[in-house]
Image (cartoon, rainbow, N blue to C red):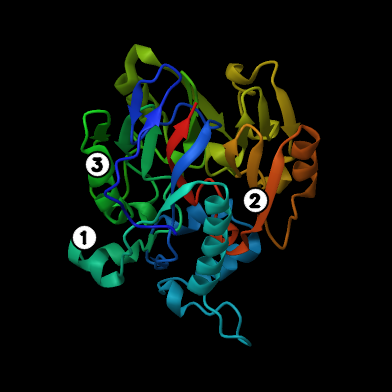
């Protein structure tokens, strides 16, 4: 059964027998042992949110319309099917429940954030914070975990800035130990626009390939990380890592929408999303290529469990059979899951998780 937090002190052991601690991510494809899965708790941004129109460009047109119609409403109040009366929150919750079942069947320990209500947000951040809304379904973006270093990110997306409060109890438990280095980026005011010279990073843009760290930078100025965020991370990590900036076209929200790494030497990738070509780190890799027209359906944003196991989302617009067949041809077992409600909000399986512990 998934849980919000535990007093059990789990540890990862490397091949030499040395403890890596309760939090450790050495790559995108190491054996996943512990993970956070998001919650179906959220409040849609108001039409007063100045950033909203530009940010909606990363969604298909039909989903842009739905987002505008439901602006300023709690997910529990967003009826998505008039005949059945089902709400946005109920659809998200059902998808999460099925996702957790698959993860637990694969021997992955699942944690959940502390549930945030509208009243919680008002108490912690003030009533004006609800203009930007909040969204607990995608825990990936608030944290960046590289090795045993846990970084609280400074997000560009106003909708996501309060989510970190729901992760606080788990962070306090997992990170207050000598084996984990816990830090936060410089955080600017919750409300208002950021100047582009502020360091902005979102977890969906950061991918760990052992000692090489890729950082996506979308040309869309309303979403994702920026060059100053890349420079901040490069400086913070120092000489232990090679940090590589990866420019993306303006229809791509995050790097993990255009790149997934099921195992070392194999990538699912959309070459047309990369303005300056594919990163050198992927040179000579086996590539499963995807057309840019499919990125809006989140076809690439899957979750590797280990080198031979992969969870893949699909929706009403894209069944993902081509990627599934390509992975199976390479000996990878694929667990498909319908994730349409999450996809309509601009994310999929990697977005909906924050890996805490992977064994190399």
- Say whether residue 319 is left or right of residue 213: right
Residue wearing tag 3: 187
- Check contact, mark 2 vs mark 3: CB within 8 A: no
Where the N terminus falls, by quadrant?
A: bottom left
Would residue 348 be visible to someone looking at this image? no
Q: Secondary structure at mark 3?
A: loop
Q: Which mark is residue 125?
A: 1
Q: What is the distance, in whole Å, between disc 3 and disc 1 at their CAs?
A: 14 Å
Horizontal side of 129 relative to 360 (left or right) equals left
Q: Residues within 10 Å of mark 2 (few under 14, many from 20)?
A: many
| Secondary structure beneath label 1 | helix
Residue in the image at 73% along x and 38% along y? 290
Residue 8 to residue 183: above or below: below
**Cα–Cα gap, marks 2 and 1:** 32 Å
Q: Name the residue rendered at 33%, 16% in the picture.
A: 238
Badge 3 vs badge 1, beta-carbon distance below 8 Å = no
Q: Earlier in the sequence, mark 2 or mark 1?
A: 1
Residue at the spot of label 2: 296
């Amino acid at each position: 059964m998934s849980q919000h937090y535990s007093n059990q002190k789990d540890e990862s052991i490397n091949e030499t027998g040395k403890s890596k601690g309760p939090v450790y991510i050495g790559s995108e494809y190491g054996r996943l042992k512990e993970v956070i899965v998001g919650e179906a708790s959220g409040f849609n941004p108001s039409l007063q949110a100045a950033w909203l129109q530009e940010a909606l460009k990363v969604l298909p047109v039909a989903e842009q319309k739905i987002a505008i119609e439901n602006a300023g409403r709690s997910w529990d109040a967003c009826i998505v099917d008039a005949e059945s009366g089902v709400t946005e929150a109920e659809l998200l919750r059902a998808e999460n429940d099925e996702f957790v079942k698959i993860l637990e069947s694969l021997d992955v320990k699942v944690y959940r954030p502390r549930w945030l209500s509208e009243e919680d947000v008002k108490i912690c951040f003030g009533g004006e914070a609800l203009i930007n809304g909040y969204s607990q379904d995608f825990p990936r973006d608030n944290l960046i975990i590289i090795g045993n270093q846990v970084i609280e990110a400074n997000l560009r997306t106003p909708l996501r800035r309060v989510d970190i409060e729901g992760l606080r109890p788990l962070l306090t438990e997992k990170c207050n130990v000598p084996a984990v280095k816990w830090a936060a980026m410089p955080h600017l005011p919750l409300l208002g626009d950021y100047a582009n010279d502020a360091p902005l990073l979102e977890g969906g843009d950061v991918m760990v390939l052992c000692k090489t760290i890729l950082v996506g930078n979308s040309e869309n100025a309303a979403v994702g990380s920026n060059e100053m965020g890349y420079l901040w991370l490069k400086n913070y990590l120092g000489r232990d890592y090679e940090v590589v900036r990866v420019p993306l076209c303006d229809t791509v929200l995050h790097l993990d929408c255009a790149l997934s790494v099921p195992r070392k030497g194999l990538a699912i990738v959309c070459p047309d999303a990369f303005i300056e070509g594919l990163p050198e780190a992927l040179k000579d890799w086996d590539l499963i290529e995807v057309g840019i027209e499919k990125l809006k359906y989140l076809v690439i944003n899957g979750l590797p469990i280990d080198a031979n196991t992969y969870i893949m989302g699909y929706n009403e617009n894209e069944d993902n059979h081509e990627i599934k067949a390509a992975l199976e041809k390479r000996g990878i077992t694929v667990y498909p899951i319908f994730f349409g409600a999450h996809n309509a909000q601009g994310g999929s399986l990697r977005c909906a998780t924050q890996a805490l512990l992977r064994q190399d």
